[in-house]
Image (cartoon, rainbow, N blue to C red):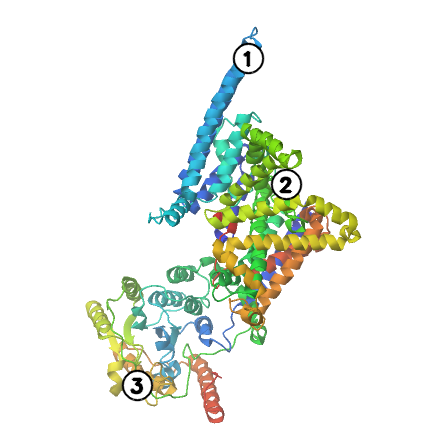
Amino acid sequence: MKKRIVKIVICVVLLAATLFLLQKLLVPKYATTNEEGILSSEYYANAGNNDVLFIGDCEVYTNFSPVKLWRDYGITSYIRGTPQQLTWQSYYLLEDTLRYETPKVVVFNVLAMKYAEPQNEAYNRLTLDGMKWSRTKLDAVKASMTDEETVASYIFPLLRFHSRWNELSSEDINYLFRTEKLSHNGYLMRVDAKPAGQVPDPVPLPDYTIGHKCWEYLDKIRETCEQKGIKLVLIKAPSLYPAWYDQWDKQVVEYAAKYGLEYINFYTLADETGIDYNTDTYDAGLHLNLSGAEKLSAWFGKYLKEKCGVEDRRSDAALAAEWAEREEFYEFMKEAQYKQLREEGAVTRYK
Amino acid sequence: MSFVSLGFLLFLLILFVLYYALPRRFQWVLLLAGSLVFYAFASPKYLIYIAVTALSTWFAGKLIHDAYAARDAYIKDTPDITKEDKKACKEQAKKKGRRILVCCLILNLGILAVCKYTDFAIGTINSLFGTDIAFLRFALPMGISFYTFQSMGYIIDVSRGKYQAELNPAKFALFVTFFPQLVQGPISRFDQLSQTLYSEHEFEAQKITQGAWRAMWGFFKKMVVADRLVPVVTGIACNPDKYAGGYVLALVFFYTIQLYADFTGGIDITIGVAKMFGVDLAENFDRPFFSKNITEFWRRWHITMGTWFKDYIFYPVSVSKWMLKVSKWSRAKLGPQLGKRVPVYLSTILVWLATGIWHGASWNFVVWGLLNCLVIIISQELEPLYAKFHEKCAFSNTKGWDVFQMFRTFWLMAFLRVLDVYRNVPLTFRMVPTIFSSKGWSEMFSGGMLKFGLEERDYIIVAVAIVIFLIVGILQGKKPVAEQLAEKPLVPRYLIVWVLIIVILVFGAYGIGFDATQFIYNQF
């Protein structure tokens, strides 16, 4: 009997190990394609000691530079932003962050409030797969799933990505057990510039009412911040498009006024921030490039310091040493991208 | 709840643990509860249909049982009963039994007919008389054709006195609703299934393991092969204007493979799962594509349906008074040789008409059934010619000839089945001849087959799977593969199972990017 049990255990362990390896092999590595997928998981290596937390979609991870905030103001910050990060995903990423640290200020970018329902499985994956398993992740998955998705496929990503056997590449082998750092505390750098040309006219909508689910989760973000003594700041990044309608803006302004929150629409502050849409965007107005992000961070750092009382922590030697490493990586990536620009005429990879 | 879902696996796990944890005497009760839960997942409202069938059939069985018991008691308690009285008493009980049987058949076949065939009848009336009667679009309860036939087989057998009626309504409900066979059969017989279904089962590791292997083999067929071929089959069949010629031949071939993998895979899951609960279900297939002719094919394919039609339609019709009259007439008019075959052929036509209609409420199934019948009758009529051919040709006794016959039967069945896919008789007869035109052939082999979402590697997987089916089929000829596997040493045995699990998980056509498809026979 004992021998039989040992045999069964060995069989089960071998099968589990094989499945684990297969899963590791088949899940996307986000190393050289769809790199934004790595952002969500990078946080855990940098958790703790951040006074400011940015949550939101691409408009936060391309538009603010934590390294600039540190350099100019000694502000420690992290961006938990992922592509098309929905309002409820931002809430759960905040909740997840609070398991590791309690920032003084949370900055939420409101663009995602245009989406009142789960949108796209691929984007969900980019946001959720990188989260460490916890009750929070389970809730985030449940809130985000489209009709075609299942919780099981998040628990066992092999069930989702099994068909990638057809597209395995050397990347999947090279990054089987390792990842490479990509972001700068959540900031995804691009140094190239593409001037904004003709911006598409906003398409009139039949209904401009922001969805109930967005308000519900914004309430949760606000209440969580209140409970933890965190100052919540609402922002709208300075993108030229996709359209952020005045009707939406008005609703956010009213919400902020109702609860005594700060709301900054950076699009209206272009003169103050110094954003030049001919030089400060890498995709003709959607996202800021390094130059734009640094300008915006310079302005916002001042705001954080003066209006939110975020302290300068550059005198903390241990912290300074950590950030020195980050600055070094920042400079390395900046140089690598400028080199690409010089030699290849375009930025085709981050490093 | 689809067999091919995590929900089903979870359901199975819970039921399995409870089944062997509970006192043995409650096992059948748990199976009944599980079966009802399983059915309720399809849609709770469907429970009414199956409940009506189960309860009405049980009640009819009980009434017949009471009538026969009263008859037996009367005969037993009347020692001086005359032969005439005894005969009259038996006749009276028989008549009563027959009345109950007819009522039960009308009710249950009526439900089946209304649910399944109302719109077919309306459509036919509309096209014949140019009317515009609106379709009623009744929901088709899951497995209605299967459980109705199973129940009707039971009540016919009870009325024939083949076995005693089941007096416990809950036990009878389990016979009707036993969850593994609800999806697509097999159509079980009460005398065979009841013993294994209601008895107490010990935890037999070997039987359970073999059941699990069988189910896994079914998942392989369904998920790796059948579901992988869905895009190419639907892609070609749904766009007849675009895909003709060579594509039609590809459709004929791939649909046959899909149907085989889907149906036999589903039955493997059914039999395997039942076995894990200690229940032995009847085999529904016996390597059908190793058949050398169409008659043999139908003895090996969907066996439980074939035997059902044989026992409950073919034989009763063949020996009916009306058919005996026909026989007499045909012998007199057509001579003894041809005359004796006429009633057999008439019964055969009736059976195949019923088989076609059973498969689906549309003319393509009726035509498909009748074409099968036609091929069988022609084969039988040409039998003397075949015999002469075999006498004269030495090669007709070689292995090569056997292989040729199997190949011929495969393609014959494949071409008949194409009526299933187009679901339109004129369209099918228009498309099949295009195979002999030049249409589509060159396009097919220059990337045309990759337009349906399948890549070259997918076709390679299907090709490898077909080779595996062949090897397993050859091995199966000796004895069940699960038994052969159980005899292997531990390492190769588990290596095979391990590879099977990995192959299903990795190469299975499931999840996002694949259309989850119900079993084909679940629609019938």
Question: Does residue A198 appear to the left or right of B398 in the view shown?
Answer: left
Q: Tag 1's secondary structure?
A: helix
Cα separation between marks 2 and 3: 74 Å
Question: Does residue B235 appear to the left or right of B310 in the view shown?
Answer: left
Q: Can residue B60 be seen in this view?
A: yes
> Mark 3 and mark 2 in contact (Cβ < 8 Å)?
no
- Give the number of the disc on residue B204: 2
Q: To which chain does the residue with label 1 belong?
A: B
Cα separation between marks 3 and 1: 102 Å
Q: Tag 2's secondary structure?
A: loop
Outermost right residue: B394
Q: Residue B79 appears in which quarter of the rendering?
A: top right
Q: From the image, state whether disc 2 or disc 3 is nearer to you.
A: 3
Question: What residue is pinned by disc 1?
Answer: B86
Who comes first in sequence, dot 1 or dot 2? 1
- Give the number of the disc on residue A198: 3
Compared with B97, A38 (above or below) is below
Mark 1 Cα shell of 10 Å, populated few (<14), some (14-19), many (≥20):
some
Compared with A145, A264 (above or below) is below
Compared with B397, A227 (above or below) is below
Q: Position of residue B51 (x, y in %)?
A: 43, 36
Q: Tag 3's secondary structure?
A: loop
The N terminus of chain A - image quarter? top right
Q: Which amino acid does label 3 sit on?
A: Gln
Q: What residue type is labelled 2?
A: Glu
Cα separation between marks 1 and 2: 50 Å
Q: From the image, state whether disc 3 or disc 1 is nearer to you.
A: 1
Mark 2 Cα shell of 10 Å, populated few (<14), some (14-19), many (≥20):
few
Q: To which chain does the residue with label 2 belong?
A: B
At x 53%, y 17%, the residue is B90
